[in-house]
Image (cartoon, rainbow, N blue to C red):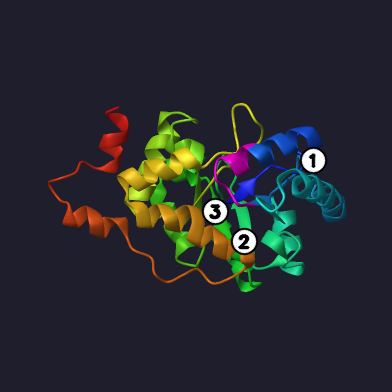
Amino acid sequence: MIDIHHHLLFGLDDGSPDLETSLKMAEMAAADGITHIVCTPHASNHYAFRPEENAIRFAQLNEAVTKALDDKLTLGLGCDFHLSYENITDAVANPTKYTINQKNYLLIEFPNMGIVPAMPDHVYQLVLAGMTPIITHPERNSTFVEHPDKLDDYTQMGCLIQITAGSILGGFGRTPQRAAASFLEQDLVDIVASDAHNIDRRRPLLRAAYEEVARNVGDKAAERLFVTTPRAVFYGEPIPADRESPQVAQKEEAGKKRSLLSRLFSR
């Protein structure tokens, strides 16, 4: 499995506080079956994004992880990009400054207190600059939970959607879990990531969510969401075109299976 959203770099934001914790997170992730991690420190008004400092800490972490885990884990570098005017302007002027492994995919986080009507136009500026935005955890954003049709403005311009593994399992409460299940049923989701911050509550794990998706949506969908698509993102490659909608399988099993939502909430 490949985790493209993970706060593994230490001492930069509300993720890992130190190298020791980062190593524990890396070991936990590798034991869970994760083979690649993109380190994604915040780029926000609260946490300044400093590429030079990030690169230094990434080199320290990569050396320590390689020594501890040999070749079990491959690290990459990106950021958790908050959609502010300053960030968008800078990203358009410097298209690979914030992207994953300095290629073409960019994790974007929307404000949770309301999304301005002009936001699709602002995001489209990133697309015009050559980036493919990946909307992070919309199931945890009140605007998208209450108005999921607003995601259409972004998917139609080529944005991808990433939900959080913990949301699938109920770790953020019933509302995000219900929204995540709904997005999966509607075939809106492209990637599942951990958005890990620590080794306690927001842990670097994907396996349980993978198995939940495989049980309820299918093995092919799980492989696409946790391996195939995030691998393409990690290496800056086109998204594979062999996507099979889980809705097809559901129609074939009509009358035999309950919906994903009903199965999750009947437990």
Residue at image mark 3: 135
Residue drawn at 58 percent across, 71 percent down: 237
The answer to which of 141 and 11 lies nearer the viewer is 11
Magenta residue span: 28-36
Q: Is residue 187 left or right of residue 231?
A: left
Mark 2 vs mark 3, foreground winner is 2
Q: Amino acid at mark 3?
A: Ile
Residue at image mark 1: 12
Q: Amino acid at mark 1?
A: Leu
Disc 3 or 1, which lies upstream in sequence? 1
Which numbered circle lies on residue 201? Answer: none
Q: Rounded to the nearest whole Å, what is the CA distance between mark 2 and mark 3?
A: 15 Å
Which numbered circle lies on residue 234? Answer: 2
Mark 2 vs mark 1, foreground winner is 2
Q: Quadrant of residue 13?
A: top right
How packed mark 1 is, by other alpha carbons closer than 10 Å (few <14, some 14-19, many 20 or more), is: many
Disc 2 or 3, which lies upstream in sequence? 3
Element marked by disc 2: helix
Q: Position of residue 59 (x, y in %)?
A: 83, 52
